[in-house]
């Protein structure tokens, strides 16, 4: 699995053409390929006024892990009846909680245009994949990214990263078309680092919608790494400015980026 990619979701599917006044089934699925069996899920289905719930659960605690074959409760039918024409949106949410204090959330929408003679169905389509730490710190799954490979003319898939956000938002990694751009590689001088020549330190960061660095991803612990060097480079990130990422609609949003900080003697 790629880091920064979500491998869980809630599905909403209608396999027939609904007709006004007639009962039809909505199939709900909630599954995860990344969570263990001790991470339960909670599904909620919001049905708008104008559509009646005839039978079936609109809220259910489920076992989402596809590794846990003992339980088969993550797929079921909700029987609905449209009672008047109009445009409707059915919303399905999945919240997963794990013993280590992390939680994952996603949301899927299904749009219905009910007419006297027919119904147009669109979806379900996901609108967000987010992770919550300790009930307060919230991150968006930032997704993988194609980029030029070093020493080659082709593109390679770079591992994705999480994006720090200050609240829940309906943004997917595929919605971002322009990623953060930095004006110049930052340089910082370090008299305590014992350097004979400039060296680069790479960080993965979240760039906020105003172009500032709002979160620095923790670096993996390396026994040979110079902690003073890394701390000096990290301090320089406070002054770095980016052109923020933008969605297809032109909205400035938070996104992840790579930064190489040059530490000079």
Image: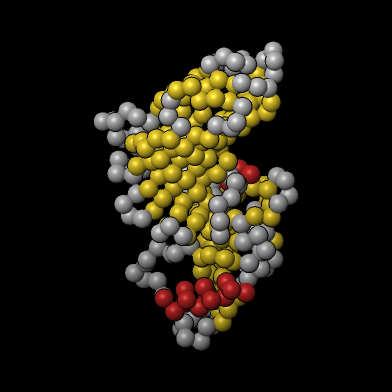
Q: Is residue 138 above or below residue 225?
A: above
Looking at the image, the residue that sits furthest to the bottom is 191
User: The N terminus is located in which quarter?
Assistant: top left
**Image x and y of residue 47, in percent:** 55, 32
**Image x and y of residue 168, in percent:** 55, 52
Depth order, front residue of 141/257: 141
Q: In this view of the protein, can residue 181 be seen by the observer?
A: no
Looking at the image, the residue that sits furthest to the left is 70
Depth order, front residue of 189/55: 55
**Image x and y of residue 63, in percent:** 34, 36
Q: Residue at x 70, y 44 (%)?
A: 248
**Image x and y of residue 184, in percent:** 67, 68
Q: Is residue 199 left or right of residue 86?
A: left
Q: Residue 221 sits in which quadrant?
A: bottom left
Depth order, front residue of 185/81: 81
Q: Residue at x 39, y 35 (%)?
A: 60
Q: Residue at x 52, y 73 (%)?
A: 234
User: The C terminus is located in which quarter?
Assistant: bottom right
């Amino acid at each position: 699995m790629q880091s920064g990619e979500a491998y869980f979701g809630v599905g909403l599917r209608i396999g027939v053409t609904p007709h006004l006044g007639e009962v039809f089934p909505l199939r709900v699925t909630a599954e995860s390929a990344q969570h263990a069996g001790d991470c339960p899920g909670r599904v909620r289905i919001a049905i708008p006024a104008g559509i009646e719930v005839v039978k079936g659960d609109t809220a259910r605690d489920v076992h989402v892990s596809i590794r846990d074959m003992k339980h088969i409760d993550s797929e079921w039918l909700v029987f609905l009846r449209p009672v008047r024409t109009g445009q409707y949106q059915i919303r399905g949410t999945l919240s997963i909680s794990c013993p280590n204090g992390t939680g994952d959330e996603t949301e899927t929408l299904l749009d219905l245009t009910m007419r006297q003679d027919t119904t147009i169905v669109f979806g379900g389509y996901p609108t967000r994949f987010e992770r919550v730490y300790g009930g307060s710190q919230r991150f968006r799954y930032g997704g993988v990214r194609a980029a030029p490979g070093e020493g080659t003319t082709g593109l390679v898939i770079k591992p994705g990263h999480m994006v720090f956000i200050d609240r829940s938002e309906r943004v997917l990694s595929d919605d971002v078309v322009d990623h953060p751009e930095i004006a110049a590689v930052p340089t910082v001088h370090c008299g305590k680092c014992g350097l004979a020549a400039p060296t680069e330190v790479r960080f993965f960061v979240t760039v906020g919608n105003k172009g500032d660095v709002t979160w620095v991803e923790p670096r993996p612990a390396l026994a040979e790494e110079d902690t003073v060097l890394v701390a000096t480079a990290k301090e320089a990130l406070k002054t770095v400015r980016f052109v923020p990422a933008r969605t297809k609609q032109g909205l400035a949003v938070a996104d992840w980026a790579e930064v190489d900080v040059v530490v000079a003697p």
